[in-house]
Structures are given as structure tokens and as C-alpha cells.
Image: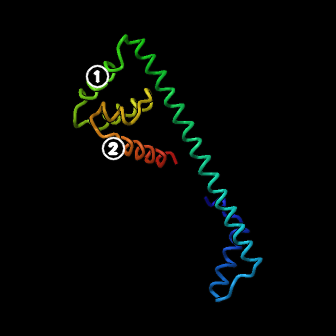
Amino acid sequence: MTDFLTPKLLEAIENKFLAERDNRKLSWLERSEYNLEVMKFRDALRRSEQQTQAEHLKRRKQREQKFVNIRKIMMCQRHQTWEEITQDFRRQYAAIPSDDEEAKTEFVLMLYNKYCLSPTLIGNIVNKPSRTIWLWLEEWAFENEQLKG
């Protein structure tokens, strides 16, 4: 967002602030410059948000397609239905000792990263609400970004 703060916008904001502080009205030219720069800022911000949303949607669709492909491959390789495969994942998760949080974490990350399962499906496998899985994955991603940086 700070990339959109141009020197002209900052100057227009400062002029408006100084005018308000001195209890004077902006001139027509100052008001027009202020309105134009604010409009440019809003437009740039809106375009950036739309681009971010479009990229997010594109990545989500790619991930969904990857999941569908992985699912088909697993069903062919294992000669099982998808329900049998998810039951197998449930058994694997249940076999992890309840006090081994690291193994549980690795299992959930494997389901998410390797098999591209959605947080909703992972929640069904590990018997937790999908919202909990979403929040946990976001927290995990944030913490790992902190470790990298």
C-alpha cells in the first residue's frame, strides 16, 4: 500500500492538513489536486486488490485441479474408492499417539501439501472443524515465513 503513496499525494494531503490547521479553505486548484490524487490512490489500491484476488482464485483453481488429478491417480494405484482412501487416512491419523503433536502436525501438512486436500477434508479426516484447520494452516504458514525471514 505504501507503494501507492506518491509525492504528489503526500503533498496534497499536507496542503489540506495545513489549510485545516490554519482554518482556511483550500483553493479550487488545491482541492482539485487533492481530489485527483486521492482518486488515483483509490484506483491503484482497487486494481491491486483485484489483481491479488485474481491471483488467489487462479492458485485455488490450480490447487483444486491438482487435487482432482492426485485423487484419480491414488484411486487407480490403490484400486480403492475415495471413501476407502479417506478411511485409510483416518486410521493412520488415529494410529498417531495423542501426545505426539509433531507427528500430527507432519501428517496434516502431508495431507495438505502432498495430496492437496482441502482444510475441510482434512478436518473430516482428523475430526476437527474445517475452520480450525484453516486457522492452524494460516498460523503455521505465518510462523514459517517468520522463520525464513
- Identified at 74% across, 82% down, the residue is 27
Residue 119, percent from left and from top:
38, 36
Looking at this rendering, what residue extends furthest in the bottom direction?
23
Q: Are marks 1 and 2 in contact (CB under 8 Å)?
A: no
Label 2 crowd bin: few (<14), some (14–19), many (20+), radius 10 Å: few
- Identified at 37% across, 44% down, the residue is 136
- Identified at 62% across, 57% down, the residue is 45
Q: Which of the 4 quarters of the picture holds residue 114? A: top left
- Residue 122, numbered label: none
SS category of the residue bearing label 2: helix
- Vertical side of 22 occupied by 79: above or below: above
Residue 106, percent from left and from top:
36, 33
Q: Tell me: 7 left or right of 113.
A: right
Q: Which residue is mark 2?
A: 132
Name the residue type under label 2.
Thr
Looking at this rendering, what residue extends furthest in the right direction?
29
- Vertical side of 44 occupied by 77: above or below: above
- For marks 1 and 2 on the same chain, the one whose residue lies earlier in the sequence: 1
Name the residue type under label 1.
Gln
- Vertical side of 61 occupied by 79: above or below: above
Residue 60, percent from left and from top:
51, 36
Label 1 crowd bin: few (<14), some (14–19), many (20+), radius 10 Å: few
SS category of the residue bearing label 1: helix
Q: Which residue is mark 1?
A: 87
Measure the C-alpha gap from mark 1 to mark 2: 21 Å
